[in-house]
Amino acid sequence: MIVEFNSSQRPERRHHLRLAPCAGEAASGRWLSLGCAALGGTGLWQTDRHPLFVFSYLLGSHCSMFLSAVEETEKCAQGGKVRYMSQSKHTEARELMCSGALLFFSHGQQNSAADLSMLVLESLEKAEVEVADELLENLAKLFSLMDPNSPERVAFVSRALKWSSGGSGKLGHPRLHQLLALTLWKEQNYCESRYHFLHSADGEGCAHMLVEYSTSRGFRSEVDMFVAQAVLQFLCLKNKSSASVVFTTYTQKHPSIENGPPFVQPLLNFIWFLLLAVDGRAPLCSCFRGKLTVFTVLCEQYQPSLRRDPMYNEYLDRIGQLFFGVPPKQTSSYGGLLGNLLSSLMGASEQEGEDSQDDSSPIELD
């Protein structure tokens, strides 16, 4: 049976049955259309039943439960915020919509499935449901089945990440980011996959993806740059553990990188020393001033490698602020990153006297 669940402003399609929305649904303008050939009809029909009635009918015995939940939703709208009388019915209705979306996806009905997927998200938002692994996996499943080029997919993932943040203002739940990254990796959308890996806690998965990305799309001369960018960005996000894992895994698994450290590629040696300095395990890092000295010398000695990408110094400015007490960018007689580092060193003795913590970062990490 051909089933299509459409949003407002979609053109009417020939030989489809259109269900007129009821009053509670008129604002959103959603409507269901079914192929009239499947029903034995030909013209455009209208009915005063709820537009989700036919969808519920198609799924069988859950019809009355679903309609009941929908009616309660409409009756309980107060102050523009929808509240359900029965949380259990609300949960069942959401599960029904999710099942319907999967059914539509299995029959190639992308528009219908995408609209129901958005309704699932709307249900989670309005009911203020707490984030749970099962819900995140369901959302990731719906995302994986959407057409990669559809605008609905972009809107879906944006709302899903916003909901998963729980109103904290962060960029989404790490587990959801990980699931999205894995899906995009399978689609060989490496750039988008890398973005989501960066906001997850899966450094190992990110490394394996980067190895594939480098070997399939990159130049042999750039094998070090793939992991260097990821490590620096993880550190900018204050994720030391993932930065270390992605570096270790990548350098061990990449077929073009010889066993190290030390490495043949100078940039990899810089990243290795940087991670030791951030962790306080590099030579001379027994005190705060020692850590800053090591960071300054590293950035100075490896400038030829760091000039390969103009963004490296931008990342290092931020890393210096987060882990080594380097002040934010400011006008200096020295100028640039090294100017900030030298300015920090000249004032480091005063800061060391004020700060009794020898090995800790001057900025608390989340």
Image: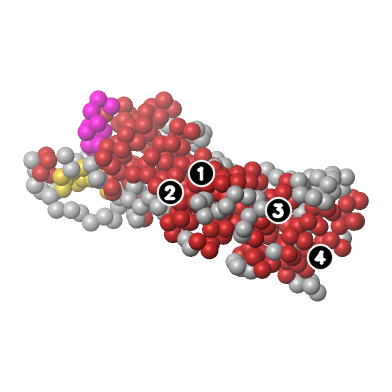
**Mark 4 and mark 1: Cα distance apart in space:** 37 Å
Q: Kindly identify the residue that appears in the image at 65 percent across and 50 percent down.
A: 261
Residue type at tag 3: Phe
Percent coordinates x, y for residue 270 in the rendering: 68, 57
How crowded pointer 2 is (Cα within 10 Å; few <14, some 14-19, many 20+) is rated as: many
Is 327 displayed left or right of 117 in the figure?
A: right
- Quadrant in which the C terminus appears: top right
Between residue 269 and residue 51, name the one nearer to us: 269
**Mark 2 and mark 1: Cα distance apart in space:** 10 Å
The residue mark sitting in front, 4 or 3, is 3
Mark before the other along the chain sequence, 4 or 1:
1
The residue mark sitting in front, 4 or 1, is 1
Q: Which residue is mark 4?
A: 342
Mark before the other along the chain sequence, 4 or 3:
3
Residue 342 is drawn in which quadrant?
Answer: bottom right
Q: Is residue 199 visible?
A: no
Mark before the other along the chain sequence, 2 or 1:
2
Q: Which residues are magenta?
A: 49-62
Applied colour scheme: secondary structure
Check disc 2 and report its element: helix, strand or loop.
Answer: helix
Q: Which residue is mark 2?
A: 185
Check disc 4 and report its element: helix, strand or loop.
Answer: helix
Percent coordinates x, y for residue 345 in the rendering: 84, 61
